[in-house]
Image: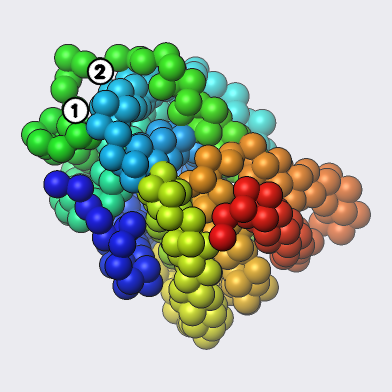
Amino acid sequence: MKNKSITTGSIWKNMLSFFFALLLGAFFQQLYNTVDAIIVGRTVGSDALGAVGGSAAMVVNLFLGFFLGLSSGATVVISQFYGADKKTEIEKAVHTAIALSIAGGAAIMVIGVMIAPWIISVMSTPAEQAEAATMYLRIFFLGMIPNLVYNMGAGILRAVGDSRRPLIVLIISCVINIVLDVLFVIVFGLGKMGDVYGVSGVAVATILCQLISAVIVIGILAKSKASYRVNIRKIRFDFGMLLRIVKIGIPAGFQTTTYTLSNTLIQSSINSLGKDVASAWAAYGKIDVLFWMTIGALGTVATTFAGQNYGAGKYDRVRNSTRQALAIAAIITIPMSFFFCAYGDTLLRIFVTDQSVIDIGVQMIIYLSPFYITYICVEIFAGVLRGMGAAFMPMLITLCGICVLRVGWILVVFPMRRTVETIEMSYRITWCVTSALFLGYYLFFIKKHRIK
């Protein structure tokens, strides 16, 4: 039966219901990453935490981020067809999307395993962390096919308004991951055998959980009676549909990649300041991710609401959902920033015990978290524009406002004043500039296309 909650009824109530399910799912997604960090940081050591949460995390985000951006093209296409109730097109889009995740996963796996040592070296990873980071990456890339299949399958369910079942799958996966982390690193004693063995244990636990998640979500789609049902024998490329997906997905993928590339350059600059700064940045990242998973969930809500209502021709609901998504984002972000600043020291101690690392991490929190509010326009407007099928300009805005400006700052300003504050300032500036650009383009787009 078709879910009408997105195209009819109270926008903010339905949006919050969808958002909280997505946020809870994102929480469990991050929970097993956080458990990895806690076990590695406190059982193996701060160098192992830097290996997993620093350079390796940046590389994973680079590859995975491009595909997830690409897969958002499938989410948008499916949500628009679902809003318009076009069953034949939905079937073609779903099977093409799954085929894309399998092919993309295989390509990323091969490339990632091959270039892992080289890219860790290029990023100026501290010598104490390089070997463990390389091992973590290679194991993680071996699980890329189930990782992408799960994310694509969950994206299909969310595109049609189902956020409950992906949440259940994540909870199951998270519990299993925690058990496997403890089993491999603590019970089997890999953590006591050194950094390389310790991070290998959490990497194997992660890819096993991704495999379980992929099997479950494909099972859900295969057993469905709705138009988005997956028939294993029908998984193949429909090239007309593939073209439609990549037309939206490739710009979105590049948008995500440019952001990650700039962060990769940031990571290299952080690494050049020493292992304490690198470890503090990794620990701060585990706290900072709470904001990013929140705003990311709201961006997904904005995309889904815009996509289904745009497909159904309900343009008034597109604009109203945009305004209400921005309001929700602001109401959540402001208290979160205050909380991080007030309890940063306590939060950091969850991950590390070295006082010098904690002191650096507290400075990072106080410097950056008050500026989270300047970023919300980027995520919401980008999500809405993608939902309406506009992907090129959001990519271009992100390329200029985030990547080019941030890279220029690091290449020109950072060499003149090699401090962590100089690196952090690049975030403040680029968030403000990119938000202003997105606001301007959104207003131009709705006026040009007469979305009233």
SS assignment at label 2: loop
Residue pointed to by mark 1: 230
Horizontal and vertical percent for residue 420?
73, 61
Q: Left or right: where does residue 248 sit relative to residue 148?
A: right
Tag 1: amino acid: Val
Is the C-beta separation of discs 2 and 1 under 8 Å?
yes
Determine the image quadrant of residue 264.
top right
Residue pointed to by mark 2: 235
Depth check: 350 or 83 in front?
A: 83
Judge whether 444 appears above or below 248 on screen: below
Depth check: 131 or 345 in front?
A: 345
Q: Residues within 10 Å of mark 1 (few under 14, many from 20)?
A: many
Horizontal and vertical percent for residue 48?
45, 48
The residue depicted at 53 percent of the width and 69 percent of the height is: 323
Marks 2 and 1, how far apart at CA = 8 Å
Depth check: 264 or 260 in front?
A: 260
Quadrant containing the C terminus is bottom right
Q: Left or right: where does residue 219 sit relative to residue 413?
A: left
The residue depicted at 46 percent of the width and 35 percent of the height is: 73
Question: Is residue 278 something that shows in the picture?
Answer: no
The residue depicted at 34 percent of the width and 41 percent of the height is: 84
Tag 2: amino acid: Ile
In the rendered structure, find residue 337 and report the number of the disc placed on it.
none
Horizontal and vertical percent for residue 340?
51, 77
Q: Left or right: where does residue 407 sit relative to residue 261?
A: right
Dot 2 or dot 1: first in sequence order is: 1
SS assignment at label 1: loop
Horizontal and vertical percent for residue 80?
39, 41
